[in-house]
Amino acid sequence: MKTVNVPHKEQLGQEAQVILTSVEKKMGKIPNLYATIGYSSSALKAMLETEATLAHNSSYTAKEREAINLVVSQVNDCDYCLAAHTMLAKLNGFSEEDTLRIRKGSVEDVRLDAIIKLAQSIAKNKGNAGYAALENFYGVGLDEKAIVELTALVALRSFTNYVFANTQIPIDFPAAKSL
């Protein structure tokens, strides 16, 4: 089987190099997954623009978006994204125990619980969340804008999960604890 190597920035096309230089300035490094997605500058650009767009005027706080990232990555068994988003979740105020509860799909906060349960259901059921998860979501006051954004966030995280699943590149973040 072909091994996918993490490219050095200089091995990529000019557009990907520009994008990754910006990522490096912002994050202090170029994560292996971003570099690998950089094999396609279009995919890298689309991923980063989608992430930025969904953060702007969002139905979800940065903390809630990290919870979505964690639960979806757990459903998809993505060790890379679990490592990266556990670190980011902690930077956004979650404790280690909070991240584990989120990944298991149940937290005490009613709003956050409805969000992660719906994200988990969408990811597990190939998009079809099911009546109970949707009713619970709407029951805590979330609306149509929120369901569309949640679906987009699940799709975005699934994309990065799938890239890792098909490349198995080295994880360059501290490993997330096993459940």
Image: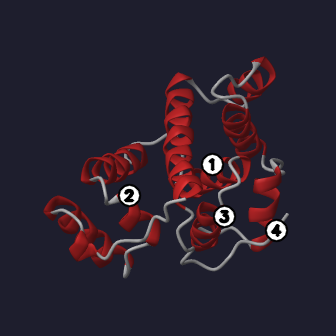
Q: Which percent across, then down, holds residue 71?
A: 70, 50
- Label 4 and label 2: CA atoms lie apart by 26 Å
Cα distance between the residues tagged 1 and 4: 18 Å
Residue denoted by label 4: 178
Q: Toward which corner of the image does residue 128 lie, by quadrant?
A: top right
Q: Which residue corresponds to mark 1?
A: 68
Q: For the residue marked with disc 2, what is the amino acid? A: Ile
Q: Residues within 10 Å of mark 3 (few under 14, many from 20)?
A: many
Which of disc 2 and disc 3 is earlier in sequence?
A: 2
As drawn, the label of residue 79 is 3
Q: Is tag 3's residue or tag 1's residue first in the polypeptide sequence?
A: 1
Left or right of 69 on screen, residue 71: right
Label 3 – label 2 distance at C-alpha: 17 Å
Give the residue at the far front of this rendering: 1
Is mark 4 in CB contact (under 8 Å) with mark 3? no
Q: Decide: is 165 above or below 85.
A: above
Q: Which numbered circle lies on residue 37? A: 2
Q: Earlier in the sequence, mark 2 or mark 1?
A: 2
Question: In this rendering, which labeled residue sits more in front, label 3 or label 1?
Answer: 3
Element at label 2 = helix
